[in-house]
Amino acid sequence: MPFTVTVEPSGRTFTATEHETLLAAAIRQGIGLPYGCKDGACGSCKCRLLAGHVTHGPHQSKALSAEEEAAGLILTCCATPHSDIVLESRQVSAAGAFPIKKLPVRVLSLERAAPDVMIVRLQLPANDTFPYHAGQYVEFLLRDGARRAYSMANAPHLRGDVPTLELHIRHMPGGKFTDHVFGTMKEREILRIEGPFGSFYLREGSDKPIILLASGTGFAPIKAILQHMQHQGITRPTWLYWGGRRPHDLYQDAWVRELAATMPQLTYVPVVSDALPEDGWSGRTGFVHQAVLADHPDLSGFEVYACGAPIVVDSARRDYQAAGLPEDAFYADAFTSEADKAG
């Protein structure tokens, strides 16, 4: 018998069996719970269990500590139910989530944007609209059953006459998929994807000022969100902090500067942590999430959208809440690699 799962305060309900995780059941039924890696490594799906009993599968302690579990927090990506469940999740999306599809795609172009960043454009089937929210991601379905997740870097309205998805892929040496992208992938190659996934997209019902925090290729979904904001005429005050180790890691710096010239509400702050003398860098230095605090020591009135390496996202979540940011005003997508998931 399936169990009933109720999500408060929205009151939305869905069913789950004892053999599937709460998150998998929610996705299957179009319920937009927050999540990221789906592997117990990032903590993005953390919710409070208000009633009922669950069992956790394998997960990392940095995603859910023993103390947090004892305090009633769970990871929906790892938790299976043993009774009817009541969860508290203030980020649950409204009804009508976009359907998740499996699609063939063709590699349209490959562009080396930095020594270790490839911009891959994928052509969608001509007869498929593939709706998604700016900020969401797709998963490549590899032949051995493995999956690799990458965010769309173009807003839905910019897919073009030839429907195209833009992805920003960082090379992870020895990586099963990225070695192929940087070594043997060719234009016109056919791949399979599934999506859209993720709860990282702009909440448009708010009028709070926005801080967008990106590290490395975590810029990809942020780019899509900025394009969407411009298209929708959203004029909330917005700051983009983009961090990299070296200036070349800010691989579309010129694009951002051009965009900022057309969006007076957007302030762009690039930050480099390991600049060398030959880089000629004269901008901000240090850790990108700390640059936000230097400029905005009180974050109580903001919303933050953070994307990039888990250490950046985790540090931002901790330090921004200490600076007054409400827990439910922090939206994140940690770019969790296979090495991160292995823990």
Image: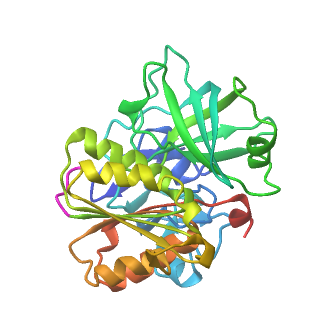
Left or right of 133 in this view: 43 = right
For residue 4, above or below residue 239: above
In the rendered image, residue 216, in percent from the top left (x then y), is placed at 55, 61
Residue 16 in view, yes or no: no
The residue that appears at 72% across and 26% down in the rendered structure is 189
206 in magenta:
yes
Please name whichever residue, 119 or 79, is drawn nearer the observer in this view of the structure. Answer: 119
The residue that appears at 30% across and 80% down in the rendered structure is 295
For residue 288, above or below residue 7: below
Left or right of 243 in this view: 62 = right
Left or right of 120 in this view: 177 = right
Q: Quadrant of residue 139?
A: top right
Query: Which secondary structure dominates the residues rendered in magenta?
Result: loop
Please name whichever residue, 305 or 160, is drawn nearer the observer in this view of the structure. Answer: 160
The residue that appears at 58% across and 76% down in the rendered structure is 275
In the rendered image, residue 114, in percent from the top left (x then y), is placed at 63, 53
Which colouring convention does the figure follow? rainbow
Quadrant, the N terminus: top right
Residue 267 in view, yes or no: yes
Give the residues in magenta: 204-208
In the rendered image, residue 132, in percent from the top left (x then y), is placed at 42, 36
343 in magenta:
no
For residue 73, above or below residue 127: below
Quadrant, the C terminus: bottom right
In the rendered image, residue 144, in percent from the top left (x then y), is placed at 82, 39
